[in-house]
Image: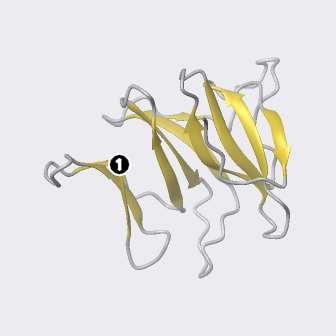
Amino acid sequence: MVQTVGANIYDSEFYTMNADGTGLTQVVGNLAGRMDSPSFSIDGRTILYTRDVDGYENASGRQLNAHILMQRLDGTGLVDLSVVPSGSGTNGGKPAGTNDLFPRFSPDGAKIIFVNVNNDNQSAPEVWVMDIDGRNRTRLFQNANLPDWK
């Protein structure tokens, strides 16, 4: 996965390519709002990434409403994991006024570890985990950042 950034942080696209640099194929691009943190599933057929779905832009690169998105490499199956369907009866959904960032698939593909942080640019980030469908969000650590699986 290659992430390109144009003249500003909001001009971002995701591509796949062969190890020798050939076969460049755009996976995601030309969307309003900052995109970041692309990550492959273990089987290599699905990606996670974040995008400020409100399309907010300013000179510092700040985000106001970043969501975790999951889609297949062919561009189909887009799912917003930061929004849980109403009536699901489970703990889920991103709290208002926060950003979900830096998502990573678990080794078995059943869970996602990520950061949630208030969008005030002052609060400490927290590491959370959720099911692959966005449900059962559980905070693991306060004052922590950039999680990954061992």
Q: Is residue 7 above or below residue 44?
A: below
Residue nearest the observer in this picture, 76 or 116: 116
Residue nearest the observer in this picture, 106 or 56: 106
| Residue found at x 17% / y 55% | 21
Three-letter amino acid code at the position of disc 1: Met
Q: Position of residue 3 (x, y in %)?
A: 38, 58
Q: Residue furthest front?
A: 150
User: Split into 4 quadrants, where in the image is the C terminus?
Assistant: top right
| Residue found at x 57% / y 62% | 55
| Residue found at x 56% / y 53% | 51
Q: Position of residue 116 (x, y in %)?
A: 75, 49
In this picture the colour scheme is secondary structure
| Residue found at x 67% / y 43% | 114
User: How many numbered markers are drawn?
Assistant: 1
Mark 1: secondary structure = loop
Q: Position of residue 106 (x, y in %)?
A: 58, 29
Q: Is residue 14 above or below residue 129?
A: below
Q: Position of residue 79 (x, y in %)?
A: 53, 32
Callout 1 crowding tier (Cα within 10 Å): few <14, some 14–19, many ≥20: some
The residue beneath circle 1 is: 1
Residue nearest the observer in this picture, 29 or 103: 103
Q: Quadrant of residue 149?
A: top right
